[in-house]
Image (cartoon, rainbow, N blue to C red):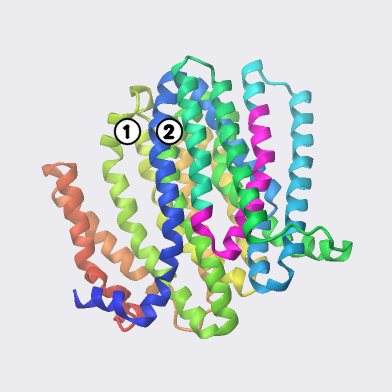
Amino acid sequence: MSNIRYLLKSREAAERFEVLKHSGYLLLARLFARLASLPFQLYAAARLGVPLFGVFAFTLASVEMLSALGDMGLSRFGARELVRHEDRRAPLAGMILVMQILASALLTVVVLAVLVAVPPGPTKRDVLLLGLAAAFVSSFIFTTDTIFTAYQRFSASAVFAVAGRVVYLAAGFAALKAGYSVVAVTGAFLLGYLIESGLRMAYSGSRLTSFSFGFSRRELTEVVRGTAPFALSAIATLVYFRVDTLIMEWLRGDIAVGIYNAAYSFFAFFVWAPIILARTLLPGLTRRFASDPDDGEAATWFWYRAVGLAGVPLAFTVTMIAGPLIRTLMPSAFAGSIVTLQILIWSIPMLMMVTVGFNTLVVTDRERAAAGSTVVTAIIIAILDFFLIHYFGVRGAAVAMVAATAIWLFQVHRLLGRVLAPGHGAAGAFGLPVAAGLLMAAAAGLTSGLGVWVSLAAGLAAYAAATGLGGALRPGSTWMRL
């Protein structure tokens, strides 16, 4: 207990845990969104059936991919530049908005041309057109999110995200209950995007910064060049997250996509943990490295180890309860989602560590190296997905995700070795989580005959004992000195 009090009271700990204040807003918003979305996903799966639910999931994945392409990495680059150049925030905001709109418009034209050249069935066509409109509207959401991050207005971001999600879910539930088709449900999704983007733009323009368009072509060209590695990284990241759905649609069809995305719906709830870390850590790390590089390095090292340590029991918990959870909440046709979720969830601890490492590379102007690691990971997961989905179906996609994430973490860890001071090796980063995780698995295995919940409790208790109930994170601990 003394170690826990130390963490809560020490000045150093207070500075490092300040990020939780900002993360808390987004975390609560995403927690609400995911908890509220889960019954909607279950209801939609039951009402639409596996094939149409697969069409809906495929459309949402396409929206994510197109939104990332339209963002071009501007969210991360713009937030960093707005923090660094407070005197130029109005023209920077204007440039970001113009680039987001132009990129989204270009993508809209390209996708429309593809739909005309290779027309899908009427229902899928209508759903994809609505999704395309949502992808265009997302350009305004990305623009304002950049501004909110730079100004650290995470509470406002959370409120508007919740408002958009409430509109989407309310309209979606009403459409399903009335017996409308998947087209109407996708229309509800678009409506939520429209409401959220409108609220965000009004707040940004009136409370935070004006959108000045009085910039020169040279300034715009400089932003485009600076954005290039971020754009590459953003596109590669979305390939990493969603290429599995696109390949599965091609190789296995709507039914496989529906089963996979039932598991992915649960997995995506936890994906927001590293995304929230990325948004909230970036401004703070940027300022710390600018004012005191040693302090920035210490903060990075702390969070890099801490998120890995926290991610292991989270993944273990989901693995243990995946069976009871899906059997209770999902129709029997989705039974294949259980093992898929149990595999997928082990990407989370590694992905959380990747996020902290990636942010460190960005704020120390090594974004090209960070982008390179992401591109390599995207290529690897696409190759793995193609072969593993072909031979093993839905579970193959989950294995591909875990394997590619491990390779990504290996790359980022090596790159961090060139940024952080010597001595921060693999043993210090991974030794304790792996050792405690093995002890946790052993405790769960020994008590497996007593039921899932007893086994889960025994495993978590073993993990807590092995990590010293928080003492592992104390700066003076042996683990933190490794």
Q: Position of residue 66 (x, y in %)?
A: 66, 41
Stretch in magenta = 129-156
Residue 142 magenta-highlighted:
yes
| Viewer-proximal residue among 201 and 247 | 201
| Viewer-proximal residue among 427 and 235 | 235
Q: Position of residue 52 (x, y in %)?
A: 52, 21
Q: Return the residue found at the far left.
A: 450
**In the displayed structure, does residue 348 sit left or right of residue 195?**
left
Q: Secondary structure at mark 1?
A: helix
Which residue is tagged 1?
A: 326
Amino acid identity at mark 1: Ile
Q: Secondary structure at mark 2?
A: helix
Q: From what the image shows, is residue 418 above or below residue 74?
A: below
Q: From what the image shows, is residue 184 above or below residue 63?
A: above
Q: Return the residue found at the far front.
A: 206
Q: Position of residue 374 (x, y in %)?
A: 60, 57
Quarter occupied by residue 55: top right
Count of marks, rendered view: 2
Q: Return the residue found at the far top.
A: 179
Asked if one can make out residue 247 in the rendered structure from this viewpoint, the answer is no
The earlier-in-sequence mark between 2 and 1 is 2
Quadrant location of the C terminus? bottom left
**Marks 1 and 2: in contact by CB < 8 Å?**
yes
Q: Position of residue 181 (x, y in %)?
A: 54, 17
Gap in angstroms between the C-alphas marked 2 and 1: 9 Å
Residue 128 magenta-highlighted:
no
Which residue is tagged 2?
A: 262
